[in-house]
Image: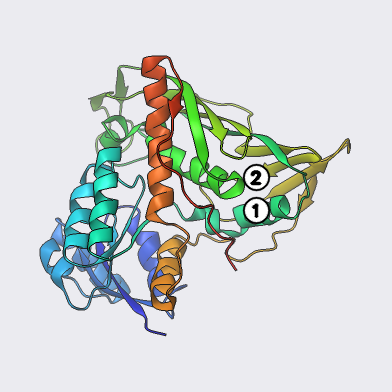
């Protein structure tokens, strides 16, 4: 089977784990054939640390005959521009989340990719890890009966206390829903299928944020986006979901994700991780029971999605972290904000195939 060759655009904070896994854990299944960044020193450091070629200019990487798939790790506001340039150059592309900032941009990307007969993939790929995949098998095997409802909660007080450059989290394309919502929504769609309509409320808790991390400690930044979002998800299957994402909450005791069925309840792990724990409480049982993980990849396996995409291309089968799935999740996130602004339900225009379980 031909190994697909990966060119990486953007050597920022998230690139480290991708490079580590794509040259290590998944190194026998694909090839990293080039890296590039506007800050040349970053790419040069990656070249030295991971023994991958440094390509000076982004366009040179996109045009390289040694690159089959472009891994787009730029900041969200650049996802569309870089991905469009990749597909126009005849390359498959895998974007970090969100797929694009705007649904119109993402739709254009998918259309252009189809016209150029290349694929689009998108993060997150954490739903392919041992934790969520174990939950998927428990649901599919009927451990909690027919799913009726689900709830997901991602709440903290923002990233300005630890991230070295947190400004973009509070700019258009940022906020808790667009930053962390993809993990929760992708996991829920993987477990329960596509979403038909949404409603919600969105609020901006603070007008400014003060950075307390280095090197920008003390810098005050304006907040452009909603920072506390509560959404209702009506799944096509009939299940009803609840999701809250917030950068306004200091502490809470709510679970990451729970799924409620006709015969029991399932407590899922943090969808921003690949492992467990997983708990089930069937019927009127007095206690939750921890279920051993029965799938692969419990460790931080960032890069699993693009690896599955690469093998899907070589094998001629669909890949799981697809552009259609990422687009559907993007529309859901925008739909919740639109519903809040209009005071009405938002009917989803997109759908997606529920991704196959990871073998």
| Residue toward you, 188 or 209 | 188
Name the secondary structure under disc 2. strand
Q: In which quadrant will I find the C terminus?
A: bottom right
Spatial distance from mark 2 to mark 1, Cα to Cα?
A: 10 Å
On the question of residue 271 being in view, the answer is no
**In the picture, residue 103 is in which quadrant?**
top left
Q: Quadrant of the N terminus?
A: bottom left
Quick check: 230 left or right of 287?
left
Residue 312 versus residue 247: which sits nearer the camera? Answer: 312
Task: Please say if 150 is above or below 293.
Answer: above
Q: Quadrant of residue 349?
A: top left
Could you tell me residue 255's position as x and y percent? 63, 35
Outermost residue toward the bottom in this view = 1
| Residue position marked by numbered label 2 in the rendering | 268
Residue visible at 30% across and 16% down?
Answer: 207
Image coordinates for residue 226, horizontal then vertical, percent: 36, 23
Label 2 packing within 10 angstroms: few (<14), some (14-19), many (20+): many
Query: Badge 1 local density, few (<14 within 10 Å), some, or many (20+)?
Result: many
Left or right, residue 83 beside residue 277: left
Q: Which residue is mark 1?
A: 136
**Residue 288 falls in which quadrant of the image?**
top right
């Amino acid at each position: 089977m031909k190994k697909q060759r990966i060119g990486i655009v953007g050597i920022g904070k998230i690139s480290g784990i991708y490079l580590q896994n794509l040259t290590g854990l998944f190194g026998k299944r694909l090839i990293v054939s080039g890296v590039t960044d506007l800050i040349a020193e970053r790419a040069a450091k990656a070249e030295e640390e991971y023994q991958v070629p440094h390509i000076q200019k982004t366009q040179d990487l996109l045009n390289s005959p040694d690159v089959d798939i472009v891994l787009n790790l730029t900041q969200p506001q650049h996802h569309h521009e870089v991905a469009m340039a990749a597909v126009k150059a005849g390359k498959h592309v895998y974007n970090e989340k969100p797929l694009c900032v705007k649904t119109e941009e993402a739709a254009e990307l998918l259309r252009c990719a189809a016209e150029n007969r290349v694929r689009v993939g998108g993060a997150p790929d954490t739903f392919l890890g041992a934790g969520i995949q174990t939950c998927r098998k428990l649901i599919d095997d009927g451990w909690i009966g027919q799913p009726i409802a689900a709830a997901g909660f991602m709440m903290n007080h923002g990233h300005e206390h630890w991230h070295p450059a947190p400004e973009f989290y509070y700019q258009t394309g940022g906020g808790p829903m667009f930053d962390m919502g993809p993990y929760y929504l992708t996991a829920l769609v993987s477990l329960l299928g596509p979403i038909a309509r949404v409603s919600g409320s969105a609020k901006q808790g603070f007008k400014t944020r003060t950075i307390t991390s280095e090197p920008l400690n003390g810098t005050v930044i304006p907040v452009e986006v909603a920072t506390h979002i509560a959404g209702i998800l009506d799944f096509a299957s009939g299940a009803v979901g609840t999701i809250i994402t917030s950068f306004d909450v200091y502490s809470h005791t709510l679970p990451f994700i729970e799924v409620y069925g006709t015969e029991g309840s399932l407590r899922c792990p943090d969808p921003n991780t690949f492992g467990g724990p997983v708990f089930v409480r069937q019927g009127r049982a007095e206690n939750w029971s921890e279920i051993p993980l029965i799938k692969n990849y419990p460790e931080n396996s960032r890069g699993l999605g693009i690896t599955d995409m690469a093998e899907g291309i070589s094998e001629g089968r669909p890949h799981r972290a697809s552009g259609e799935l990422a687009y559907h999740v993007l529309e859901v996130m925008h739909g919740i904000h639109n519903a809040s602004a209009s005071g009405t339900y938002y009917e989803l225009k997109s759908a997606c195939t529920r991704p196959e379980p990871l073998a």
